[in-house]
Amino acid sequence: MSDLVHDLWTSWERKRVENAEPIGPPELCQLLQELFDKPGAADRWTKRQALKPDVYRLPAAVGTGEYAVIVKRLDPSRGRRNQLVAKRWLPAVGLGGCVPSLLGIAAERSGAWVWHVYEDVGDGVLETKDPDPARLEAAVELIAQIHMRFAGHRLLAECRLCGEDFGAVFFGANLRDAIRSLEALRSLTLPDRQSFEITPEQAALRDRLLERLHELLDQETQRARLLVEYGGPETLLHGDLWTTNVLITPGCDGPQARLIDWDHVGVGPISYDLSTFLARFPIPDRPQILGLYRRRVGRCGWRLPTISVLNALFDTAECARLANRVIWPALAVTDGQAEWGFEELARVEQWLEELRPVLL
């Protein structure tokens, strides 16, 4: 490690001791010491920056410049997924450089959390409004490369085992889980064995969601058949392809794209990733972006289906995701968090009502 990295550790340790305010658990402190403990001059930490929940940038002022790492807290299963993406899966297809380097991992003694330490590659999030053409092309190129290189790859079984399955089963499984979770709200007993009566308005919301989910479940066979016929080969999917997870950095040959936060990585049809990615952009821009992807995957002989079929595939992915969003607030209500749970269920209902075709 360089002296700058050592400065990062020593500055952080000094601030932690002086302020008596640990930035992380002892296991993380030990990891940073093991990674960065080398002789060198140290300066003070500036401040920790919260980027997302449980994600922090830890910068250190060193002379006239700065160095930083990204520290992220994850549950063990998602930590393992991110580790495999960075250390095994993407390197296996020659794309190891398209994610930030994973410098080290620390597991809390309780077993509840792990901490990942990554190189900091900046804040160059891909724009959704009037994106720079070169930056947009770099992002689409990387997404297409991941999808193409993993199609039929030997590691897909491992990716599915350690990640998610976003194939045809994902739609029906999430609908059935969501329906069961809502049905549990009909006769509700809290963990302390106290009965709980939901309001008429909450009951009406529950019933409206149940009706909508049952309607979608009736379409399971038709949607599954469409996925099998037109979904294309199974491949590795990022699983949460918002543009906030696409970072663009300068490169020798132009902009370079990197994907972060692989917490929901899995296996399935490309439509699952594409629906998320395209929906982040204004509707008039989506056909052009899809055209970029279509041309890139066309190099290996892939032919995307018609717009109407793509919209149906995209709708299946989005409805499955929204069904998944029903499960957790419904379970929260049964655990005694009724106010928050029903607020979230109301949001999901609104999102279902506002659902429109991705492509016009």
Image (cartoon, helix red, strand yellow):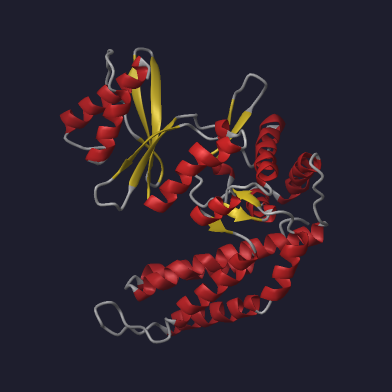
Is 21 placed above or below 18 here? below
Is 344 placed above or below 40 here? below
Name the residue: 43% across, 73% down.
330
Q: Please provide percent x and percent y for residue 153.
A: 65, 46
Q: Please provide percent x and percent y for residue 200.
A: 44, 85
Q: Please provide percent x and percent y for residue 134.
A: 70, 30
Q: How many labels were placed on the picture?
A: 0
Is residue 250 rendered to the left or right of residue 109?
right
Which part of the image, by quadrant, shows the C terminus? bottom right
Where residue 1 sits, quadrant-wise, is: top left
Name the residue: 32% across, 49% down.
113
Name the residue: 39% across, 30% down.
69
Is 229 placed above or below 114 here? below
Where residue 250 sits, quadrant-wise, is: top right
Q: Please provide percent x and percent y for residue 4.
A: 36, 17
Residue most extreme to the front: 154
Where residue 254 sits, quadrant-wise, is: top right
Residue 343 appears in view: no
Is residue 157 rendered to the left or right of residue 327?
right
The foreground one among 222 and 44 is 222
Is residue 243 rendered to the left or right of residue 11?
right
The foreground one among 338 and 7 is 7
Residue 170 appears in view: yes
